[in-house]
Amino acid sequence: MSFEVIIGIEIHCELKTKTKMFSGAPVSFGLPANTCVNEIDLGHPGTLPSLNKRAVELAITACELLNCKVDRLIRFDRKNYYYSDLPKGFQITQQFHPIGKDGYVDIEVDGGSKRIRINRLHMEEDTAKQFHHGDVTWIDFNRASTPLVEIVSEPDIRSGKEAASFVEKMKSLLEFGDISDVRMEEGSLRCDVNISLRPYGYEGFGTKVEIKNLNSVNNVQRAIEAEIIRQSEVYLQGESVVQSTRRYDEASRKTVLMRKKEGTVDYKYFPEPNIPPIRISDEFYQRIKDNLPKTAEQRKSSYINDLNLSEADASILTSGKDLADYFEAIVHCGAPVKNTANWLISEVLSVANLRNDRKFSDWISPSDMADLLIMIKEGKISGKQAKEVFADMVNGGKPKDIVAKKGMVQVSDEGQLFTWVTEILNQNTQSVEDYKNGKDRALGFLVGQVMKLSKGKANPAMTSEMLVKELSKR
């Protein structure tokens, strides 16, 4: 018997705000534990929450990018449960009145397009973070009350590959929308997957199993594929799948039981009494709609149609917002478009991958990168020299200073080039004969010899032209 796979995904996304959801405490990552929290986050008696306006703007932006209907009346609910990572004993969320619902995104899988519906998008606050060491649990409250949106898909996904494509699409929309930094390894975007199996043709749903806190796109796909195998084996053995919460173990590449679900937890929701309903004005809503950031797809289309880049180059440049922003900033400084794309893809990304650092502007400013590319375009330095200059720029040097210090002025003077070309032709008579006999490689060899003689200073294009001209005379 074969089974149809039914998958729904919940995405928890930390918003890119400077302060917490309901307090003025700073949002941070990697700072010393319990240094970015205040009495409101900790739920001290007598404190009252104050809604973060920027979080609302980002949530509405996310709704628009996900084609959701926006509820213009913001209302919050109180979710009551007692756990060590929830200092107030309740979480402020939007259980009954999500800010967005009935949306969709289109994903690409195996060369085709598929629409995945979005059930809801709601705002809430994050919990604290726990660290378990043996029998002791430490709690870092820095994350407590960090603004979140939770995005819940409809059960429209049918495979691990589709799930991975959906998460990639969500990451791209949220990143290019400047809504979140979507760093799954840091926990700013986390995925829970709900998966069940049913025989083909069956209209109902099978028993749902939840896989919690998947921290990479690859693990989303792997966890689903592992769980499909596990549930299939259970059914084929004549047994029943038990509703449960599981986690994915990367070492064994299997899902592992965390806890069984005996029934629905009663969180005793009720309207949050300390945050009255807030009406979103027409002006506030329209301003957000009028300033929606460009998606990766829109930027890619612009690069192809307006900047005449190839689809392959445009795809790479829009693979991350950091790279697309860097590319546009360099071009804005006057650098040639095609050369900028080539250098970013071949040279800059290579260094970024080695350093595991995509904060490009931190190690080479857009204006400095533009200066280097303009010098190449104007023939002031050769491509070979440029790579040497770039290596020094990575370590903090300025391109014009490096060129001046090393005397890297490309020679385009015809008289000097003629002297070098003549000397090389006189020294390499066999290569001259080879060229005359139709061996095109000989020209490349002769250009290389001139470059060697000039210590890389000869203008390669002019050198090649002069060699062809002089060879025709011999």
Image: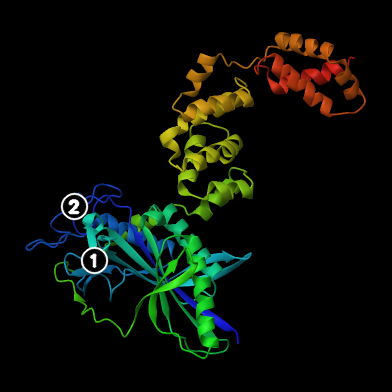
Within 10 Å of the Cα at label 1, are there few (<14), some (14-19), or many (20+) other Cα atoms? Answer: few
Amino acid identity at mark 2: Gly
Mark 2 lies on residue: 24
Measured as percent of width and height from the top left, residue 14 is found at: 33, 58
In the picture provided, is 404 more to the left or to the right than 412? left
User: Which comes sooner in the sequence, label 2 or label 1?
Assistant: 2
The secondary structure type at the circle numbered 2 is loop
The secondary structure type at the circle numbered 1 is strand
**Badge nearest the viewer, 2 or 1:** 2
Which one is nearer the viewer's eye here, 174 or 244?
244
The structure residue drawn at horizontal position 57% and vertical position 51%, both measured from the top left corner, is 301
Within 10 Å of the Cα at label 2, are there few (<14), some (14-19), or many (20+) other Cα atoms? Answer: some
Spatial CA span between label 2 and label 1: 22 Å
In the image, residue 384 sits, relative to residue 201, either above or below, namely: above
Question: Which of the 4 quarters of the picture holds residue 143?
Answer: bottom left
Residue farthest along the left direction in this orientation = 46
**Quarter of the image that includes the C terminus:** top right
Residue farthest along the right direction in this orientation = 437
In the picture provided, is 218 more to the left or to the right than 70? right
Mark 1 lies on residue: 279
Measured as percent of width and height from the top left, residue 156 is found at: 50, 76
